[in-house]
Amino acid sequence: MHTSNRKRAAIAFVGAFALASAAAITSPAQAALSGDTTTTFTLTAGNLSISAPASASLGSVATGTGTTSAQLGSVSVTDNRGALLGSWTTSVSSTDFTTGAATANETITKASADYWSGAATSTSGTGTFTPGQLLAANKVTLGATRTAFSATVVVGNNSAAWNPTVIVNVPANAVAGAYSGTVTHSVA
């Protein structure tokens, strides 16, 4: 090979190498084909609440004739806690029923009152909803606090409602008058 041809070949090689190096340095990086973003949020728990009628009348009955009873109206539990396999229990209790000056003959004790929840009138959500006393034959005395309704294995928000019955067994020594007492439902 001739010296001038060799010089030209060397110059061409150096030039090609310089161009390739410059292209490698100035070429943009290849763009990423995907990008991940960790995304988070929080669900806050709500409340467990109960509602019951403000008042109910069991009607009237003559003294010494036996019993008086009626449904109280809708009692409902709303559980917005968003639990996983949660539960709740509603209890019911009563005061004595009195009239006048609440003497012994003007008092019908809470032990003379019976309660039965009956079946649910409505439910929502996922869970097992159980009445405390499904049938009238299952009635219990309100002489002690009783379970009115419960829910187990609840998932997320849920609710249940029922219309309980209260029966007052009027003792023979009770005097005539308008009797009043308080039936209380609570949930936990």
Image (tube, rainbow, N blue to C red):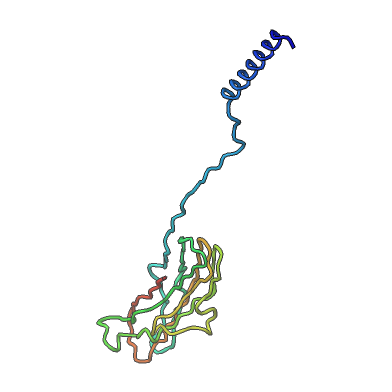
Query: Residue 68 placed where, x, y %?
Result: 44, 82
Q: Nearer the viewer, residue 102 or 9?
A: 9
Query: Residue 2 placed where, x, y %?
Result: 73, 9
The image quadrant that residue 169 belongs to is: bottom left
At x 31%, y 81%, the residue is 98
At x 49%, y 73%, the residue is 150
Query: Residue 171 placed where, x, y %?
Result: 38, 90
At x 51%, y 46%, the residue is 39
Q: Nearer the viewer, residue 11 or 4?
A: 4
Question: Furthest residue to the top?
Answer: 4
In the visual, does 42 lie left or right of 97? right
In the visual, does 53 lie left or right of 24? left
Give the vertical position of 174 relative to 165 (above or below): below
The image quadrant that residue 55 belongs to is: bottom left
At x 46%, y 52%, the residue is 42
Quarter holding the C terminus? bottom left
In the visual, does 182 lie left or right of 153? left
Give the vertical position of 47 relative to 21 (above or below): below
Give the vertical position of 7 relative to 30 (above or below): above
Q: Nearer the viewer, residue 66 or 150?
A: 150
The image quadrant that residue 142 belongs to is: bottom left
Give the vertical position of 24 relative to 87 (above or below): above
Quarter holding the N terminus? top right
Question: Furthest residue to the right?
Answer: 1
Q: How many marks?
A: 0
In the visual, does 92 lie left or right of 156? left
Query: Residue 30 placed where, x, y %?
Result: 61, 31
Question: Furthest residue to the bottom?
Answer: 172
